[in-house]
Structures are given as C-alpha cells and as structure tokens.
Amino acid sequence: MATIITCKKCRRLGVSVCGRERCAVKRKPYPPGTAPGRGRGGRRRGLSEYGTQLKEKQVVKFSYGLRERQFRNYVMKAMVVKDGMSSNRLVAFLEKRLDNVVYRLGLATSRSQARQIVSHGHIHVNGRRVNIPSFQVREGDVVSLRPQSQGKGLFADLEIRLKNHAVAGWLLLDKKTFTGTVKGMPHIDVFDIPANLNNVMEFYSR
C-alpha cells in the first residue's frame, strides 16, 4: 500500500518545503480543509505586508527543517554587520549545515532524511564521525558516508541514485567513494528556495 503524503505545511504555504518528490502540494495546491471550486474556500487570500514576510520566513525555515529559535539565531548573526550582505551570510549559514551538505551531495533524498542520517552516525567529517546536523562545514572539509553504512539500508541504491546527480558548485563529489569535499563557500546564487530573503530580514528587523 502506497504511503499518502499529506504535507499540511506545504499546502498551507502553497509551496513544497518538505523536499519530497511526491509532495501533496503538487496534487492539491490549495490549503488543507478546503476544496477547489467551492466559493472562496479553495482560494488563497491576499496577504498583508506582514503576512507576506511571515510566509516567506516560514518557507525558508521549513525548507531547511529548522525550529524558530535556530532560524532566528542564523538571521540575527547574518544581520550583525549592516553592509548589505546579510542575505548572503544567511544563505552561507544555512547551506553550510552538515545535514544540508549531505543533501546537496545526494547522500540523502531530502533534508529531513539527511538530518536523520547525520543523527544516526552515518556521516564522517575529515575521517571522524559527526552526528550533529547543525555542524558548520568549512572550506577543505571532507564529508563522507561511513564505510560500514555503504550498500546497506537507505544506501543500498546510492550508487545508482548518484549517477545523474548534479552537485552544487561549491562542493565536489567522488561518486565511487561517496565522498564530498567543500571546495568553496556557498553564495546567494545557490539559494533555490522560492522565497524573498529581503522579506525574511525585514520580518526580523521589526
């Protein structure tokens, strides 16, 4: 029996933030509890400026699988220096998380799965096991799948999955050894979440 993916958060926001290929918002692009073609029930109301900023913030936060406190801390750190580069710094903080790097390398099919993989001790950084999803990688770090985990469970078909996987430009992947290298730092041009980061900054500047 196929698993039914409800994705209530995605449907509420009107955007897929779960990272799953079979996200429910693709089948039901209207809020949960409503139905299309029934008066105003299936329509999305226009948002106020605050509502728009809140939605954009939620989209980014949920896409990276963060709690409010975690996300707020990243934003506050990014805004410490008023130099117009806050959005760039925020993207760097988010992208350099170990769970995100595991996802970007293709070792996981979603960020939520990547978080579990890291937490369960399947990932090594520079040859040592790291089980903290929020761990910030640095340029030159080597991220790899633990040898004992290769070919088993979630990773049984990894070699096949990686064949056509395109890696972000700031990462380098050896598809034979399931090893990635951080060859640079991520910039705002790698940000692929459908949200306006300026609105996110303005939300926390209130």
Image: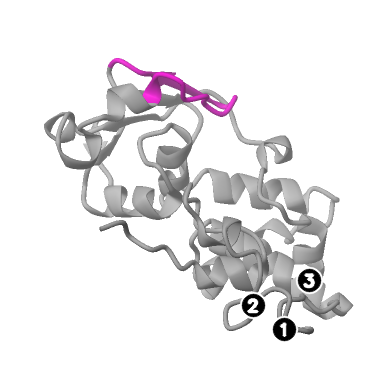
Horizontal side, residue 97 vs residue 39: left or right: left
Q: Earlier in the sequence, mark 3 or mark 2?
A: 2
Residue 40 vs residue 177, the one in the foreground: 40
Tell me if mark 2 has few (under 14), some (14-19) or many (20+) residues whose alpha carbon lies within 10 angstroms of its own.
some
Disc 3 to disc 1, C-alpha distance: 23 Å
Tell me if mark 3 has few (under 14), some (14-19) or many (20+) residues whose alpha carbon lies within 10 angstroms of its own.
many
Q: Earlier in the sequence, mark 3 or mark 1?
A: 1
Q: Which residue is mark 1?
A: 41
Q: In the image, residue 98 lies at what x, y percent?
A: 42, 45
User: Where 170 falls versus 110 (above or below)?
Assistant: above
Specify whether residue 127 is painted magenta: no
Which residue sits at x=57%, y=65%? 10
Which residue sits at x=31%, y=56%? 2
Under circle 3, the secondary element is: helix
Which residue sits at x=66%, y=53%? 90
Q: Which residue is mark 2?
A: 35
Of marks 3 and 2, the one in the foreground: 2
Q: Which residues are magenta?
A: 162-176
Task: Identify the colour scheme used.
Answer: one colour
Residue 93 vs residue 150, the one in the foreground: 150
Residue 181 vs residue 189, the one in the foreground: 189
The kind of residue on which mark 2 rests is Ala
The kind of residue on which mark 3 rests is Gln
On residue 53, the disc is 3
Q: In the image, residue 46 lies at what x, y percent?
A: 86, 77
- Whether residues under marks 3 and 1 lie with C-beta atoms below 8 angstroms apart, the answer is no
Q: In the image, residue 165 lies at what x, y percent?
A: 47, 25
The kind of residue on which mark 1 rests is Gly
Disc 3 to disc 2, C-alpha distance: 26 Å
Disc 1 to disc 2, C-alpha distance: 6 Å
Q: Earlier in the sequence, mark 1 or mark 2?
A: 2
Horizontal side, residue 134 vs residue 167: left or right: left
